[in-house]
Amino acid sequence: MENSSSKGEPWDKTTLEEGAVPALDFGKLADFFDRTKDTDAVRRIIPVAVQHADTKELLILAYADETAFRLTLEKKIAILWSTSRNELWEKGATSGDFLTIVDVLINCEQNSLVYLVRPAGKGACHTKDRNGVSRQSCFYRAIVMVNCKPMLVRLDMVTA
């Protein structure tokens, strides 16, 4: 498996999002903190698991800073911190796929959150399925071993 971090990224967006070869980005957060360490306001973020309130399906794993968290509670929609764009991310602002907050859970150490949501649009992921529709979840592939090598399989291609 090759790393796809922003330093020497070997994959284009389509290969990364639709390909069959794992390219796990173990350096994503290190790269994010390297990019922001010399700024006036160093970002302090925590992970947020975004889960469907009814089905319990994991939709997104993202991050929130204090502003995103406060705005999420005020507006009752998922507002996150984009570590890729280094800006507030109101989920659904451009796609219409808003995520309405039902409940917010916090872990025992108060360093991660779960947003229980109800999608107000067609999906939660920015990627599209083969029909051009937003995927319900960003977790649409599984890692399987094929000839002793890890490969990605789209879950919509797996038959029961």
Image (cartoon, helix red, strand yellow):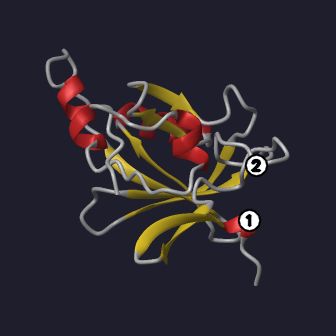
Q: Amino acid at mark 1?
A: Asp
Residue 80 x, y percent position in the rendering: 48, 38
Q: Residues within 10 Å of mark 2 (few under 14, many from 20)?
A: few
Report the side of 98 relative to 71 (left or right): right
Three-letter code, disc 2: Asp
> Residue tagged by mark 1?
156
**Residue 133: quadrant of the picture:** top right
Asked which secondary structure carries label 2, the reply is loop
User: Which of marks 2 and 1 precedes in the sequence?
Assistant: 2
Q: Is residue 142 above or below residue 59?
A: below
Q: Where does the image place residue 148, in percent across and percent down from the top left? A: 40, 77
Residue farthest toward the front in the current orientation of the protein: 147
Q: Please, which residue is most extreme toward the right here?
A: 131
Observer-nearest of 155 and 80: 155
| Residue positioned 70% across, 40% down in the render | 98
Residue 116 shown left or right of residue 31 in the figure: right
Quarter of the view holding residue 53: bottom right
The residue shown at (41%, 57%) is 113
Please give the residue where the numbered disc 2 appears in the rendered image. Answer: 129
Q: Are marks 1 and 2 in contact (CB under 8 Å)?
A: yes
Relative to 158, residue 138 above or below: above
Residue 86 at what x, y percent from top left? 38, 25
| In front of the other: 21 or 85 | 21
Between marks 1 and 2, how big is the CA–CA gap? 9 Å
Q: Position of residue 66 (x, y in %)?
A: 35, 36
